[in-house]
Image (cartoon, rainbow, N blue to C red):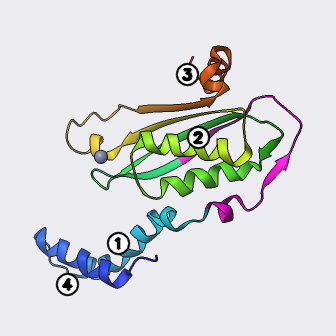
Amino acid sequence: MEPDLRRIESLIHQLLVELGEDPAREGLAKTPERVAKAFAFLTDGYRADLGTVINQAVFTQDTSSMVIVKDIELYSLCEHHMLPFFGRCHIAYIPDGKVFGVSKLARIVDMFSRRLQLQERLTEQISQVVMEEIGAKGVGVMIEARHLCMMMRGVEKQNSTMVTSAVLGVFRDNLATREEFLTLVGRR
Ligand SMILES: [Zn+2]
C-alpha cells in the first residue's frame, strides 16, 4: 500500500508545532512535504516485490567457487529511533549451478534496507533471500554499520561500528569456508 503523503505531511506539521517550531516560517514551509517524500522513499522496501527486484537476473553457471561482493553501500533506519544507520554490506555465497547478476545483490540490500530495521534482522533477511533465490550451497553476509542513534544521542560512542554476520549452509557447517569468507572480507 502506498503511503498517504498528505496525511504524513499533516503529521510532520504537527510534530514541528510540538517541538516548539513555527511551521509557517520560510525555511519550514515545505518541510512537511519534503519529509513525507523522503520517508516514502526510505521505506519503499516494504512495497518492493522480490521478483521484480531480481528480475530474472539469475544465471546458470557451473562453478562451485566462492562468489563475493564487498562493500555494498547500505543506508537504513533503525526501528527504535527512526534514525539512520549506514555502512557496508559484504555478501559471499557458494553457488550450486546458479549465480546472481552482479547488481542484483545491491538491489536486494536496498530492498531490505529501506524499511525500519534492526541490523541483525537485516543481515539475516539478506542471507536468506540469497540462499533461497539461487539455491546456494551456502551464504555469508556481514554488515558493518554506524548508528546515528548511538552517535548523536545516548551513549555518544562516535567511533563505534556495529558488526553483524549471518551464515547459512556450508558457511555454517564448514569452518574452512567460514574462515575463507572472513579473510576475504578483511575481518581476519
Ligand atoms: Zn536506534
Question: Assess mark 4: CB under 8 A from ligand 1?
Answer: no
Side of 45 relative to 97 (left or right) = left
Indicate the amino acid at tag 1: Val
* Vertical side of 125 occupied by 91: above or below: above
**Image location (x, y in percent) of residue 175:** 63, 15
> Are discs 4 and 2 less than 8 Å apart at CB?
no
Which of 25 and 76 lies nearest the eye of the viewer? Answer: 76
Q: Earlier in the sequence, mark 4 or mark 3?
A: 4
Q: CA distance from mark 1 to mark 4?
A: 15 Å
Looking at the rendered structure, which numbered label has been put on residue 24? 4
Q: Are marks 1 and 4 in contact (CB under 8 Å)?
A: no
| Mark 2 and mark 3: Cα distance apart in space | 18 Å
The numbered mark, 2 or 3, whose residue comes first in the sequence reads 2
C-beta proximity under 8 Å, tags 1 and 3: no
- Left or right: 128 with respect to 38? right
At label 3, which amino acid type do we have? Arg
Label 2 belongs to which residue? 127
The residue indicated by pointer 1 is: 35
Q: Earlier in the sequence, mark 1 or mark 4?
A: 4
- Which mark is drawn over residue 187? 3
Please name the residue shown 27% across and 52% down the image.
Answer: 81
Is 67 inside the magenta-drawn segment? Answer: yes
Residue name at image x 63 percent, y 37 percent = 91
Expressed as whole percent of the image width and height from the top left, the position of residue 78 reads 35, 50
Q: Secondary structure at mark 4?
A: loop
Per the model, the C-alpha gap separating discs 1 and 3 is: 37 Å
In front: label 4 or label 3: 3
Which stretch did the figure color magenta? 50-73
Figure check: 129 above or below 142: below
Q: Secondary structure at mark 1?
A: helix
Who comes first in sequence, dot 1 or dot 3? 1
